Image (tube, grey):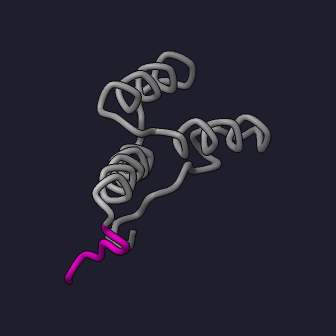
Amino acid sequence: VEIGLPAHVPAEYIDDDMQRIEVYKKIAVIDTVKSARAVKEEIVDRYGSMPRPVENLILIALIKAYANAAGILSVAGVS
């Protein structure tokens, strides 16, 4: 999935490398809107207000999950 938006977990938001990796792992297994909401709520509860790049990453993970389920091989944004 290539959308062209900043999509990452900034070190300024989660400074511990292992915690940041755990967040990436949780985001990587998002497969429904419900799981996306649960991950978002957990991150906000633990680390506070979510910066836009993390929100983008969650949305991209959800798009990827639905695209894979539909048999779509690639999703790209047009700039």
Q: Residue at x 49, y 16 (%)?
A: 45
Q: The C terminus appears in which quarter of the rendering?
A: bottom left
| 72 or 21, nearer to the observer | 72
Magenta stretch, main secondary structure class: loop
| 22 or 46, nearer to the observer | 22
Q: How many marks?
A: 0
Is 62 situated left or right of 11 in this image?
Answer: left
Image location (x, y in percent) of residue 35 = 40, 28
Image location (x, y in percent) of residue 57 = 43, 51
Q: The N terminus appears in which quarter of the rendering?
A: bottom left
| 16 or 63, nearer to the observer | 63
Residues drawn in magenta: 72-79
Is 48 situated left or right of 24 in this image?
Answer: left
Is residue 50 placed above or below 41 in the rendered structure?
A: below
Image location (x, y in percent) of residue 61 = 42, 50
Q: Report if residue 78 lies within the magenta region.
A: yes
Looking at the image, the residue that sits furthest to the left is: 78
